[in-house]
Image (cartoon, helix red, strand yellow):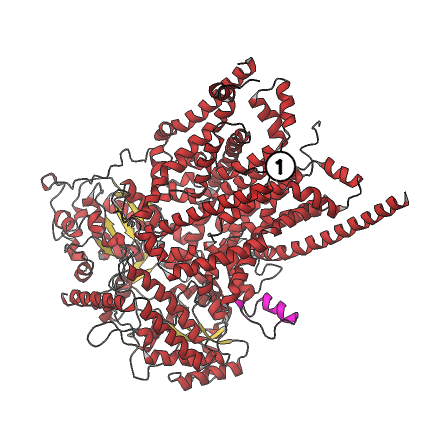
Amino acid sequence: MGRKGFISRLRSQMPLQMMVWPGIVFMIIFCYLPIYGLSVAFKHYTVVDTFQSAPWVRFENFKIAFADKFFWDSVGNTLAISFLKLLIGFPLPILLAVLISELPSGRFKKTVQTISYLPHFLSWVVLGGMVINWLSTTGIFPAMLKSLGVVGKPVNYLVQPDKYWLIAVLSDVWKEAGWNTILYLAVITSINPTYYEAARIDGAGKLRQIWSITLPLMRRIIALTFTLTIGGLLGSNLDQTLVLMNAINRPKAEVINSYVFNIGLAQGDFSYATAVGLAISIVSLILVLSTNALTRRLNDKESIF
Amino acid sequence: MMIMQRRKRSIIHENRLFNTINVMLMLLLTLLIAYPVWNLIVSSFSDARHLTEGGITLYPKGFTLENYRAVFRDTTIWRAFGISIAKTVLGVLTHVFFCSMVAFAMSKRYLIGRKLYSTIGIITMFFGGGMVPTYLLYRQLGLLNNFWVYILPQLFSYYDMIILMNFFRDIPVSLEESAVIDGAGTWQVFLRIVLPLSLPVLATIALFNGVFQWNDYMTARMFVNREELYPVQMKLYEIIVQSQTTLMSNPSAGAVLPTTTRSIQLATIVLTALPIVLVYPFLQKYFVKGMTLGAVKE
Amino acid sequence: MSQKNIHNVRFSKIIAIIVVCVMLSIPFVSCSNNPSQQVDGTPSPQKTEPASDARYIPDPEKPAYQLDPKEDTTLTWYVNADWWNTDFGNDPVTRTIKEKLKVNIEFTTGDDTKLNSLFGSGELPDIVTVFDTQSVTAKKAASWALPLNDLADQYDPYFYKVADPQTLSWHQLEDGKTYGYPSYSNTVEDYEAGWLQPTDFFVIREDIYKAIGEPGMATEEEFLNALRKIKEQFPDVLPLGMRSFAGGSTGSMGNKFQDFLGVPLSNEDGTYYDRNLDPEYLRWIGTFNKAYREGLISDDTFADDNTAFEEKVAGGRYAAMFISGAPQLSGALQKNIAADPVCKYIAVDGPKSSLGNEPTLSQSGISGWTITFISKNCKDPAKAIQLFTYLISDEGQCLYYYGVQGETFEIDGNGKYTILPEVLKERDTNPDNYKKVYRLGEFCLFGHDSFPALHGKDTGIEATRQMVEWGKGKVKPQFLLENINPAEGTAEARNLTNINAQWATTLATLLRAPDDAAFDQTLEEYKTFLKNTGWDEIVKGFNEKMKANAEKLKLN
């Protein structure tokens, strides 16, 4: 084929282009049109204001947020919890998905899968109450530790600030790990079984098969979820925080979401919340793009976007 | 020969060990998760008095169906079920189709303007105007108090599109090429080759979106006033919130009510999760290994 | 282009066009589906009807709704809370409102975000109720609501006969006019009349109290001894409990306990007094800390959320406890009695100030709980102010609490109002249905405790009856301290939020201090924190507002 001109290339792609354009139109209407709402970050905006009436304050809201020592404390807590979640909660669903997929087919496998994602449906209002119950001095957790001989008398870890991060992370992983396996399972089940056949004939055991076939073929999806998880580092679970946080563990429990909620929204100060949200969005985007640039090398120079 | 046999035997051992450990691990995991969930289910069948006293472990105390009756007592809940089912089915079908359509095009590296489209999309994943401009937009579009507010804004999600796109890229190009040679057009390739080969990921997106549609009450709360358009979740939210007001205006009710706000919450969680749990087995068949490429000729 | 390609392009074109058309046609399709949608959302306020076109002549001696000939007005009413029951016309209370005032009310509910959307769209409903009488919404009412004074003058002078003048003047804005009317606004007279019930108590299980010999618990020695005896004789019970510290609140040990001890509300000269640092109060906190060190207070108390606390109350797990907000706990208290009447909680005098200060238990102040406005958009302000007048009047109060005579209540020989026995039975056995069918005690947006207190026969619940008795006469007004918080969105407001959160943490840490040195250090750290977080500026703001309050109260 000779070098075609741009127009004729475009013309030959028309069916394809027309498949994308509705998506673009959608995004313009539903995502870009409302984006003027971000201007609230640069205004002094309260409940009674409209976008036109609220006065411009330029970068005031940002200055206020960034000069606030407690804001940075909450950033520290948020990052700590997010990193722990990454460390513990990111590999676990991958491991689980592989293990579940290797289970012999049948009722046991289906039951395990179903049960694993049930906690996803619990609301934090209820789950938080359950956690408080389990961790109380009369709850099962201290009782378990005592019977294992780890501690002398039952201790309530919710009143120990330095344990908060672990409590928050472990309870969240318990809740979401099963649900997060679903996406990985979808990828695993799409792997051509002839690969495994060939490996078996060549004398590879299960472990070798997983290492050489399953995991590499999950590379792309793992890179995707990893990148997006990095993008969510500055976020946190407001519902969980509001239930598990108390006056004693607050210094370690206050995250960006809850702090902004108390300072901003609870007082009808939308500007503060929007400004912080905007700053976080920008940082998250940068994180995602950088991670993408890094993981690209592992993915044959192909961006997941 | 002997070496191969020995090797084979050791591999069989290795596999058996692996399987045993795997099964045991999964059993442990299941128990770890199942116990609290079972506790929750059992609590939802217990009456308020025993619930507040605590101490329920493996079986209901003061067995009662009151918590569930509190939900179904309101006969408008059936209409709400209808709305929920309609919005979930319609929403999921349109969402999956729309997203995969865009994803298919975006999966082609030769698509002109791909980088531009991609930039437009990524930005939407991180920046949004917020509730109020959205409210004003819906108002202008006439989506307020309208069933389509559940469907239209959910047509497309760039995040879901990325997942689908990455998946489509893994489909061997040779399959498409041979189809084109056989005379297939773009849409035929999409509908007859790519989609059938992507059932697991389509099922996944359908599941995610379905769960979202089923659980969503914020849309109704912000954008809908008419009771006839409320989905089940909105009704359940109202019931929970109303149970708090019963106590406010009528403190003595707290003593006689066989339900508390907490007990009703437990029942609503079970009711919310139940349809998903019932529907999931139908989707599970798409998660069977190798089913997709079974009919493919290499 | 090949045949195939043309075919494809056409196909794609068709799909694309269909999709775009569907999306663009929604406005047209939905308009016809949506009869209740406002046609034009421009924010131009309706002009109030000029006097010359008046439907009726207002009469200062008669409520205007009795004079207004107009049938069938529809008013939209927004309540800024999710739990509000939007039903109208199906129960005796709202049905009567509908008949007497010839009005149909459409309620909408929502939260601050929804409210803001309504402001943004320029489609404010006719009547708006919010729950914070000090919020920006309330304070800036002059920009979006109609002044009640003007409306009363023009349409319903009888309003002045039912609205309390102290309340009206307390809620005046800078232009001297009042825009919103609150519910549960208790004035000086209300406090002096003595019928206000406190909601905070120190209670102890009756059986335990008797078993340890009903000791006084007024001094620190007595208090600790009593707790120690409880621990000896009743090892399964937690000796002392308090309301949860969840969400960073001080539960019942902050200003509620200060009220108990009668910590002064202000300095002699009317300036701000930091009650948190009152020496008497801190000495008692030290006593509780000693109790904690002796194992008389459990760590769970600090970690529990509200639900867990209620569980303990219903199970009688605490021997003695400080409770605040008793009405919300009445369910749990009743359950406790139902399980075992002997374990009933009774209120006792408990800790007393060594300076002999009387308790200053607090109740809803003059600011009230909710506040309702008539917006500039209101299509029929005359009807709206008539509605206000009716609901505030004795007739409206009676309707709210008791319903319709003969249908839901009766007046007995002593002139006391009682709810009919069959209605009461329904209330006690089938509360959900009672709510739907009768809806007594729910339409609270203009409620005021005076009516049932003065006219009703006591039908209180058993669990709190003794407590209420104990509390009579102990409620004192705290008007000087109302609404002194800095304006929202200011640096002082943010600092104050952080200071309050830090105080809750400090208080909990003090209670759990392992020894005296740690106790003192925590306190010192808090004082330094105050200094470093702009406390002086905040106090200046407090003083200014307290002075303004004093002026307002003197004018009455």
Residue under mark 1: which chain is it in?
Answer: B
Q: Quadrant of the C terminus of chain B?
A: top right
Q: Residue at x 57, y 55 (%)?
A: A87
Expressed as whole percent of the image width and height from the top left, the position of residue B108 reads: 55, 29
Q: Quadrant of the N terminus of chain B?
A: top right
Q: Nearer the viewer, residue A277 or B66?
A: A277
Residue A174 visible (yes or no): no
Q: Is residue A146 magenta?
A: yes
Within the image, what quadrant is residue A222 found in?
top right
Can you see residue C273?
Answer: yes
Which residue is at the far left?
C52
**Residue under numbered circle 1:** B200
Identify residue type, mark 1.
Answer: Pro
The residue carrying pointer 1 sits among few (fewer than 14), some (14 to 19) or many (20 or more) residues within 10 Å by Cα, namely many
Give the image location of residue B116, x and y in percent.
45, 32
What is the secondary structure assignment of the residue under circle 1?
A: helix
Pick the residue in front: B91 or B102: B102
The mark tally for this picture is 1
Tell me the magenta residue range: A138-157
Q: Position of residue C444 (x, y in %)?
A: 31, 55
Whole-percent x and y of residue A169? 54, 58
